[in-house]
Amino acid sequence: MSSAEPQGLQAFPEALSTRETWLEPFGWYREMRENAPVRYDSDRNSWDVFRYADVKRILNDDATFSVDPSKATEFVEPEGEGAGLILDTMLFEDPPRHDELRGVVEDSFRPRAIRELEPRIRELTREILDDALEGEGEIDLVSEFAYPLPVVVIAELLGVPVEDRDRFKEWSDAIVSSAGDDEGGAEFAQRQQAVQQEMGMYFLQLIEERRENPQDDLISTIATAEIDGEPLPREEVLGTCILLLVAGNITTTNLITNAVRCFGNNGLFDAYTDTGRVPTSAIEETLRYRAPVQAMTRIATEDVTVGGETIASGERVIVWMGSANRDDRQFSEGDSFIPDRSPNQHLGFGHGTHYCLGAPLARLEAEVALSELFDRLSHVEFADAELEPTRSSFIYGVESLPLRYSV
């Protein structure tokens, strides 16, 4: 689980505004690392930071670089019922409130707790593959496998009906999306507000049910939580439920899909179908090479110098982890996919206080899903298709990935 942007999320940099450049932004990253590692973009009123050391420094300094968008000079409060739900989460809170909110659900995402889910995740994976793979043929990896699995897993953890998963996908896609090419800022804001209102009503009903009749699920944990003897405010209960649903499926879907892209583009399909397993190191290399989250936003809380440039208090800073993960200053042959790379101190799940809460779950799901997939197949190749990037200015993946396969 990782980043989402508040309403009015950052526009694409002009250099990444086309389908081709967002599918492969890495050449631009390389150019920026060399020629403009810290640069101000007046069109977006934002600073962009590209080198590993600078990105890591910013992610590790909560006092100077806040996640709270209301600290930005140009911040506009979202209007309308439900419009700011996604802001009422740990994602946009600095310590100590971030730590208090994270503590409500953190035990459920610790490595030991996640390891106990492995048999159930494997069972679900096999059930989904039974439906998706029928003899020799073609499969859309995203819609038939990489999307359904993490949605079912997070739905079961939360305690929401799995049969609503199509609604979950629609909501999740809308929350992380950018404005459409034919959509103005006002139309985009209205669409976001409508989605958040619908999600809010859905979860409010579940929350009230769990307060009356708690179950062994995360919604019950959140709905009945107290901090210093006080129950969580309604907005934070709602926001936390929505955050876990959205982040719990979007990131993992794209990790699985991006991994298969990496494997196919680097001649690894046969090696993995032969062994029937995907090494953990190859998943870690995917998190470096094609991370599902490419960028995060911070707000400078004071005047600060980064890379020789002075960033003023209240200005927005976009840290490009996708660029940092390719930085040759940190990674030998940074633009090469090396499946057994070690060490691999990538920033694919962020860094510091806001390091991804769900990283252990995403890693486990990807490892199980990819190994089960390649264990089923004797041959796999990309089908002819024009890939479309996920329409988001920070989530990185493709809408569809058709594969041809034999079993």
Image (cartoon, rainbow, N blue to C red):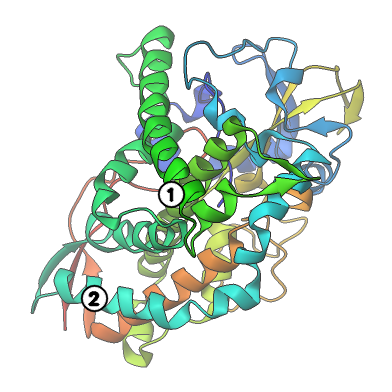
53 relative to 122 in the view: left or right: right
Q: Report which quarter residue 343 is drawn in.
A: bottom right
Q: Nearer the viewer, residue 328 or 339?
A: 339
The x, y position of residue 341, in whole percent, is 63, 75
**Is residue 333 visible from the viewing direction of this image?**
yes
Q: Residue at x 41, y 57 (%)?
A: 159
16 relative to 325 in the view: left or right: left
First in residue order: circle 2 vs circle 1: 2
Q: How many marks?
A: 2
| Residue at mark 1 | 250
Contact, mark 2 vs mark 1 (Cβ under 8 Å): no
Q: Nearer the viewer, residue 43 or 373?
A: 373
State the SS at label 2.
helix
239 relative to 264 in the view: left or right: right
Labels 2, 1: front one: 2
- Badge 1: how crowded within 10 Å, few (<14), some, or many (20+)? many
Q: CA distance from mark 2 to mark 1?
A: 20 Å
| Residue at mark 2 | 127
Question: Label 1 is placed on what type of residue?
Answer: Ile
Q: Residue at x 28, y 42 (%)?
A: 167
Answer above or below: position of 137 versus 324: below
Question: Label 2 is placed on what type of residue?
Answer: Glu
The x, y position of residue 292, in whole percent, is 50, 51
